[in-house]
Structure formats: C-alpha cells, structure tokens
C-alpha cells in the first residue's frame, strides 16, 4: 500500500492480480482484475491508475473512470447504482467516504483481506466493504450497510460490481428447468444490462450459476474469462452492464422485495458474498472455485461414500422387505451409504400429504426405522434420510395446527405447487417445530446424512399476519437450521437438493457438502448437466448416480457402460431397482464401483480439465492429479459425427513429461468400455503409447471407434 492521499494496493495470488486504488477517501476502485501483472512498485501502480482511466469523449463527467466496487450515482456512475434505498424518499444517492485507515491483513490460510469502512454523514449511512483474495485466486466481496440516522432506511438493493475490460466481448451464463439444468447461453456483451433475476426464493433450476464475460470465442482452455457468482440461496440478481462510455461491469446482489430489509437506527444489512474468478479459459476459472471449496473448513476429508438412493428404485413403495433386499444388493455391488428417500414419514404414501410431520410413518414402519438402520449398518453402510424441512402439506398435522406458519401474501392463502406450501421459518414457532423434530430423529438414529430437498418456488411469500415479504429472513433461517443440526450432530453431512439441481450456490455450500445436480440421470443429459455443474463445483461435491437401463425422465435406454462411466466422475451413487437387475449387470456395476474407488482420490482431488474438441459431437473431459503424474479422461460421443471422434487432444498434463496412454484393461470386468475387436483397430489401444504432455495437448491421439451415446476411458500415467 502506498501512502499519501492516493493509495494503491496490489493483491496477487495464483496467477491473478487485483490492483486497487484507494484515493480521496473513495471506496476502492478496481484498476485491474485479471492476469497477474507481476511485482509492481508504487510508481507502476500510479501509472496503471492513470492508464486505466476511460478515454474521454463528449462531455463526460471528470470522475466516471473511477467506479468503485459499490458503484455510486453520486460519483457519476450512470449505470445501476450499488446502493438503492431511501429514508422516506431521502438519502437515496449516498456519497460514501472512507472513515479511518483501510485495514489490510493476511488470514492464517494466506487469504489477503481488505476492510474499508465508509460513511455518508448527510445520508446517515455507513458501509463496510470486505474484499478477500484467496490463495487459489478466487476473489470475494461483500458490503454491510448500516443506518446511522433516525427513521427507517428501506433498502432496495446493495450490489457489488467488478469492471471487466472492453475485450470481454461475449457473455456466457446458464438457464434450465426441471430435469434439464445448466443449459449454457452465449451472447455478445452489448450495450445495456443483461440481468438474470431470481424471484422464486431459491437459486433455481434456471440459475445463472456463473456469469462469465470473455474474449469472444473463449473456451475451456483459451481466451480470457472473468466470472461472478453470488453465494446466496434466496432471491437474487446477477448482471452484466455495458455503458455508452465503454465501461463494462459484472455485478450481483440479493433481490429484495419492498420493505423486506428496513433498517432502524443502528441496524445493518450484510450482502451475500459475491465471488469472482478470472482465468485463461473456463477451466482456470473453475479451478479457482474448486480450490476455494476444497479449502473450506467443512470440506470433506474422507473418501466420498458410494451412495445407494432409493428414489427411482422404489418411489413411495417402501417396506422393510423391499428396502432390505435393495440394501443387500447395494452392499454387494460396493455401496457405502444407503439413503432412504421421500415416503418414510407421517401418512406420506404419495406427494399430496404429510410434509411438516417429520415423524416415522407407523403404517409403513410399525417398528420404526431402527430395524432398517441396523440392517444397513450391519451391511457396513451409513444410513441417510431424505427431508424437506422448509415445506408443508395442507394435509398435515402441522398445517392443521398452525395454518399461520404457511407463507401467504396479502391475507390470501398461498398458491399451491406440487401439492405443497412453504413453511415460513421466519416464525420462531415454525423454526422450533422443524428443528426439534429433525433433532429428535438424529438423536434416535445413527443418521450420517440428510438429503435436504426444496421442491417448489417461494412466491407471494408473505409473513403472516401482516404479509411482509419473507424470503430474506427465511433464507437466513434455513441456513441457521442446517448449521444448528450439523453442530448438534458433528459429522452430519447435508446434500442440497431442490427438485434436482435447484439450490446450488456457494451460500448453501457453506454448510452442505454435496448437491443433487438433477432429477435426470439419463447419462446423455447428465454429460451436459455435469459438465457445467463441475464448472462451479469440484466433482466430489456433485451427486452422480447410475440409473436404470431405461431413463425414468427421458425414456431413453443406455448401456450400463455409458450410465456408469458418466456417474464415475462425481460423488458416485446408484439409483436403480437392483432387484430388477440381472447377474451380469450386477457384476458389471460392481466392477464400475471398484474402478471408482480405485480412482477416487484422483477423481475427487485432481484438476478438472475439458478439451476444446473440434466438433461438438464428442466431449473430452478429465482430471489430472495435482502433481500431474497421472490423469483419467472421458471421451464421450453424444451424437454420430461425420468424421467420428477423430483425434482427441488431452489437456492439462506437464508439457515436458512423458506419459503412457492406455485404455482400461477389458479384464477389469468393464465389458462396455472397450470391446477387444474395436481396440485392435487403433494400435495404441493394445499396448499403450508413450508421448509427452505437450504432444498429447497439441496433437493428441486418434480415438478408438466410438458408438454414439457411449464413452471411452483413457488412462494416462507418467513414465
Ligand atoms: C425431488 C428430488 C428427488 C426426490 C423427490 C422426492 O424431486 O430431486 O431426488 O427426492 O424430490 O419427492
């Protein structure tokens, strides 16, 4: 940090530089966020600040090139302001000036941290800004707004933004729907605002996921990319804004309803963290998010247990006999955790009833869950349970006793969706009810894992009796509930599920260690869903299951080899009625589970790489060990291509080291992988071939013949 009135701060980590100007008492201005600029002295930084200013055109304001991370209208930012709000119509355009010295520190894990306190003494507002650069290069920011005046300050929005350079000419973000999450969409970064807003009270099946701006045509391995993500599971907005003066910014914040956050004297509102990563190619951006999650204090350190989930195997048809038969077969093929899905509680024989009554169903489980839990434990598996704590059925003891705990806006009953309503956890009684029932279950049984579902939108979510908007308070209460259960039952793991992949964000992932990426386990769809879910999350945090031969959500049939090979990469599981599988299928499935366990440290600890293949019919992805001594790649044919998969380049290895490339040995019991007759046609497949990492990345290898909707594994080991 330099002294005097103009100050500069240069943070560097893992190939990322963040150059900040802190001058004239203004909030920090980002002069550069992107590739590492190398060591820079004070003069260099002062020069950078001058050079980074916007070119002047027709009568601009003199200060428009100084856009702080909380863009201020009062400082001539003519786009979306960082702070929106008012005190009965006043104080709507704060001009924040720092109070005291910026605090720069280094946290024990090496994170570089900046805290800047500021205030507007006329508008009677204070704003504390926190900015952290993680050793893996992930940047995160948040602001805390405090009302220091009388009356109430109604907060409309507090947004944080980061500038990106003009060459970031293309945007990528995501959309989706039930069973079809994380569909990428690209567009030019045009003038105006491209805003993705969520008002469904959860991150969303159509979540923005990552909003990326990059050099046109950026891929996994090429082109500079800047990306932001909001760590929040409630209403939100994430946007890219380009002004007429050329300024480009990526911004994000919570989407607040009117009156939802209204600050009395001395009260504060803290934004969720906005996360940001830069990289050359998307893989580098993803790597920064992965490094962040893997470094979190709650990140799992033990191998991810192969999971058998009962949902698509039995749906609501639960009985001790059926489920113990399934558990027996699960254990036989190598499952390590058994998860009892929806249907075990209250009168829940279908999806019309009993949410909110979290007591074991006496009709289905007359002896309670104890005998099933014991059976599962005797087989050497952990026991997990599905819950949907934020939901309530009209037909439930809970709704009959406390109809006022259901969200309803404007005095009218809330709209029903999937025959269920939302329990407003902003009511202390509602919170205590669900907290106590879940805790009781955790005390009665050795439950290692909760699959925490959230199957409907929050809409018109008014807090009774007044009808005030309640999503903000509910989201914080849901986080608190998860935190308290984990604290009460150390080691408890929670999976975030929301009708599939509807709640995947770094807010919920501060307390969950797995997400359910989609209710669709058709491997063809899963190739796409997982490719893009892995863009944010490390594969070990993403549930990937082997389903039945005919997909329940698409009706397509796939060989076990493609189903298993697609599930191999994430937190692997099985969601298939194994009592309907034949002996050959069980043997093959067991071989795939064995392979997953053999490679699990690599699959879950390695660097995720994706190939920019020359056509979009073949996808190449893999994981490379952190020391780059070995790697495993997946080459999947999604459609028949005019020229077949052709030559496949294998990225991410050390260019100067030599590697043996081989296909898995058919004797490993993976019959779908590589029929020997096919392997004969490509010489390297029989004995392997040794090539340098540079040759593998630049030239690649000719791929084995590949049927559509099939995949090959390629092993790479340093020699
Ligand atoms: C959601 C989940 C499924 C399953 C059902 C149960 O749809 O995504 O995996 O748990 O709920 O009702």
Image (cartoon, rainbow, N blue to C red):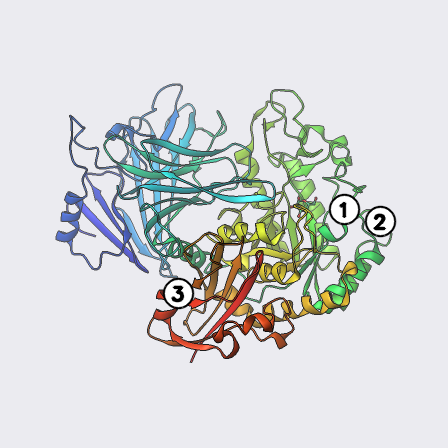
Q: Give the structural element (helix, strand or loop) at label 2.
A: loop
Q: Which residue is mark 1?
A: 343
Near-viewer residue (492 or 17): 17
Q: Which residue is mark 2?
A: 364
Q: Nearer the viewer, mark 1 or mark 3?
A: 3
Q: Quadrant of residue 120?
A: top left
Judge the density around disc 2: few (<14), some (14-19), many (≥20) Cα neighbours within 10 Å: many
Q: Are marks 1 and 2 in contact (CB under 8 Å)?
A: yes
Q: Position of residue 401 (x, y in %)?
A: 76, 32
* Between discs 1 and 2, the one toward the N terminus: 1
Near-viewer residue (309 or 149): 309
Q: Quadrant of residue 675?
A: bottom right
Q: Quadrant of residue 254?
A: top left
Q: What whole-number distance in Å separates the C-alpha atoms at marks 2 and 3?
A: 52 Å
- Residue at screen point 74% across, 53% down: 313
Q: Position of residue 378 (x, y in %)?
A: 77, 68
Residue 491 in view here: no
- Where is the C terminus found, in terms of image quarters? bottom left
Q: Is residue 626 left or right of residue 313?
A: left
Q: Are marks 1 and 3 in contact (CB under 8 Å)?
A: no
Near-viewer residue (625 or 567): 567
Q: How many numbered dots are placed on residues in this image?
A: 3
* Between discs 2 and 3, the one toward the N terminus: 2
Asked if disc 3 is less than 8 Å from ligand 1, the answer is no
Q: Which residue is mark 3?
A: 652
- Residue at screen point 52% across, 64% down: 604
Q: Position of residue 455 (x, y in %)?
A: 64, 40
The answer to whether 25 is drawn above or below residue 561 in the figure is: above
The answer to whether 397 is drawn above or below residue 717 in the figure is: above
Q: Position of residue 553 (x, y in %)?
A: 66, 45
Asked if disc 1 is less than 8 Å from ligand 1, the answer is yes
């Amino acid at each position: 940090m330099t002294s005097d009135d103009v100050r500069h701060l240069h943070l560097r980590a893992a190939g990322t530089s963040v150059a900040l100007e802190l001058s004239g008492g203004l909030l920090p201005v980002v002069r550069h966020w992107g590739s590492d600029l190398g060591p820079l002295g004070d003069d260099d930084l002062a020069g950078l600040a001058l050079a980074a200013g916007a070119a002047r055109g027709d009568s601009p304001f003199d200060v428009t090139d100084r856009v702080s991370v909380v863009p201020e209208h009062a400082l001539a930012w003519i786009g979306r302001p960082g702070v929106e709000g008012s005190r009965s119509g006043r104080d709507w355009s704060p001009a924040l000036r720092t109070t005291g010295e910026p605090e720069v520190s280094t946290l024990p894990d090496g994170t570089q941290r900046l805290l800047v306190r500021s205030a507007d003494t006329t508008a009677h507002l204070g704003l504390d800004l926190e900015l952290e650069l993680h050793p893996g290069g992930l940047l995160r920011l948040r602001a805390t707004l405090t009302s220091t005046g009388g009356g109430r300050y109604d907060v409309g929005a507090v947004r944080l933004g980061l500038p990106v350079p003009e060459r970031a000419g293309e945007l990528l973000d995501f959309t989706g729907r039930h069973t079809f999450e994380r569909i990428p969409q690209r567009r030019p970064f045009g003038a105006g605002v491209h805003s993705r807003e969520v008002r469904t009270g959860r991150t969303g099946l159509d979540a923005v996921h990552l909003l990326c701006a990059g050099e046109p045509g950026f891929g996994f391995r090429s082109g500079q990319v800047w990306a932001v993500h909001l760590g929040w599971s409630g209403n939100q907005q994430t946007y890219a804004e380009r002004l007429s003066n050329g300024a480009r910014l990526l911004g994000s914040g919570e989407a607040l309803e009117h009156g939802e956050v209204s600050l009395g004297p001395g009260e504060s509102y803290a934004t969720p963290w906005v996360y940001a990563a830069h990289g050359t190619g998307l893989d580098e951006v993803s790597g920064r998010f992965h490094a962040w999650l893997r470094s979190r204090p709650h990140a799992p350190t033990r191998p991810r247990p192969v999971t058998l989930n009962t949902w698509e195997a039995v749906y609501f048809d639960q009985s001790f006999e059926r489920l113990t038969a399934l558990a027996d077969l699960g254990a036989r093929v190598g499952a390590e955790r058994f998860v009892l899905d929806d249907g075990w509680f209250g009168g829940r024989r279908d999806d019309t009833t009993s949410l909110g009554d979290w007591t074991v169903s006496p009709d289905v489980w007359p002896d309670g869950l104890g005998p099933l839990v014991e059976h599962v434990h005797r087989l050497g598996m952990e026991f997990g349970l599905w819950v949907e704590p934020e939901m309530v059925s009209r037909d439930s003891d809970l709704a009959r006793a406390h109809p006022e705990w259901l969200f309803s806006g404007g005095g009218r009953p809330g709209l029903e969706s999937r025959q269920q309503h939302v329990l407003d956890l902003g009511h202390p009684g509602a919170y205590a009810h669900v907290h106590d029932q879940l805790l009781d279950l955790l005390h009665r049984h050795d439950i290692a894992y909760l699959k925490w579902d959230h199957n409907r939108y929050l809409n018109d979510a008014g807090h009774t009796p007044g009808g005030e908007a309640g999503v903000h308070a509910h989201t914080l209460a849901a986080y608190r509930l998860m935190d308290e259960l984990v604290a009460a039952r150390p080691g408890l793991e929670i999976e975030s599920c929301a009708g599939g992949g509807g709640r995947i964000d770094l807010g919920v992932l501060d307390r969950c260690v797995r997400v359910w990426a989609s209710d669709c386990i058709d491997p063809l769809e899963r190739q796409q869903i997982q490719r893009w879910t892995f863009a944010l999350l490390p594969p070990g945090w993403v549930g990937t299951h082997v389903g039945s031969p005919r997909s329940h959500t698409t009706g397509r049939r796939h060989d076990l080899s493609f189903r298993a090979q697609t599930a191999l990469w994430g937190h692997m599981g099985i969601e298939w009625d194994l009592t309907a599988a034949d002996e050959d299928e069980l043997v093959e499935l067991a071989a795939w589970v064995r392979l997953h366990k053999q490679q699990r440290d690599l699959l879950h600890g390695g660097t995720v790489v994706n190939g920019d293949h020359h056509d979009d019919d073949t996808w190449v992805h893999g994981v490379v060990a952190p020391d780059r001594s070995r790697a495993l790649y997946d080459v999947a044919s999604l459609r028949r291509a005019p020229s077949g998969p052709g030559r496949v380049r294998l990225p991410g290895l050390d260019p100067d080291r030599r590697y043996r490339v081989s296909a898995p040995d058919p004797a490993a019991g993976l019959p779908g992988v590589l029929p020997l007759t096919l392997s004969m046609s490509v010489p390297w497949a029989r004995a392997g071939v040794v090539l340098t990492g540079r040759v593998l990345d630049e030239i690649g290898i000719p791929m084995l013949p590949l049927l559509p909707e099939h995949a090959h594994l390629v092993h790479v080991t340093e020699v």
